[in-house]
Amino acid sequence: MALIILGLILLIAGTILFKQRDELHKLASGLRIGGLALAVIGFLTASIKQIDAGEIGVKSIFGKVDNDILTSGLSIVNPLVDVKKVDIKTQNYTMSGVHDEGDKEGDDAIRVLTADGLEVVIDLTVLYRVISTEAPNIVKETGLDYRDKIVRPLTRTKIRDNAVYFTAIELYSVKRDLFQGRIFKSIEEDFKKRGLVLEQLLVRNITLPTTVKGSIEEKIKAEQDAQKMEFVLQKEKQEAERKRVEAQGIADYQKIISSGLGDKQLQYEQIQVMKGLITSPNAKVIIMGGGKTPVILDTKDSKN
């Protein structure tokens, strides 16, 4: 736009000089040609707009925002139109108590009061993006600094509003996921009303007062130890049950064997064993006593 104005000024000046003196005709002609060239270049520059990937262009003329957006690529527009580029990629905003870790310098963590009246410090990261079709409304109502006017204040307010429903212990341990889900839903609704999509909410760290943190950690450790002991007892109980079933199986087996073997069967088995001894290469003499206890003598040595 500046080139167009400068070109018009040179063109007008050249025309005026051309009409005044003949000796200035050459200079006037140069000014007119240069002014015309600058005006044409300025017109082309102002008319052709390049929108990069991941961005859209929002047009406005004399302060009035146009609802039609420019997508990525080259576009030809009215040279008087002002085009503001809006990032529609996923963006993140971090609020942290660690220096130089968040978007704001220094301690930018969120301090909230819990249901039991304790102050808890929360580090948080918000992942969000601009809805393309809502970009003109954002530019019209908020401007391009929507991070500081929408994302930051709304997130901090919603976290404080929801933290009062949880105790410090719940936020730190057992209900942390529930808290994160609750604030996600709350922030998501308000973001959508303002043309933003909340993609993810990351509760990065929750810091408690030192004395409270110590007692909570002791309680958590005690609960973990109790759960571990319960697991061990359950395992021992299962092992005892397994041994009982095994012993019962052996007893049942022996009972079946005992009931199935009579005196005659036992005598038969005994005879079969003695026959095997007699026919073995090492000759044996078997003497049956009155008590029916066999005595086996090796006759191999006596022959020698």
Image: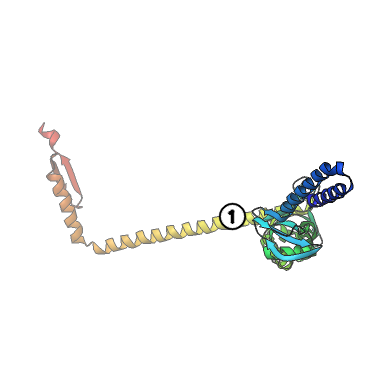
Which one is in front, 189 or 10? 10
Residue 304 drawn above or below residue 216: above
Asked whether the viewer can see residue 95, the reply is: no
Picture quarter containing residue 242? Answer: bottom left
Give amino acid for label 1. Answer: Lys
- Percent across and percent down for residue 186 are 72, 67
Q: Farthest residue to the front: give it.
A: 22
Which one is in front, 63 or 176? 63
Residue displayed at 13% across by 38% down: 299
- Percent across and percent down for residue 230 are 58, 58
Q: Which residue is mark 1?
A: 228
In the shown orientation, is residue 284 left or right of residue 118? left
Asked whether the viewer can see residue 186, the reply is: yes
User: Quarter holding the C terminus?
Assistant: top left
Labels in figure, total: 1
What element does badge 1 sit on? helix
- Percent across and percent down for residue 54 are 65, 55
Residue displayed at 83% across by 42% down: 27
Q: Residues within 10 Å of mark 1 (few under 14, many from 20)?
A: few
Q: Farthest residue to the right: give it.
A: 20
- Percent across and percent down for residue 135 are 72, 63
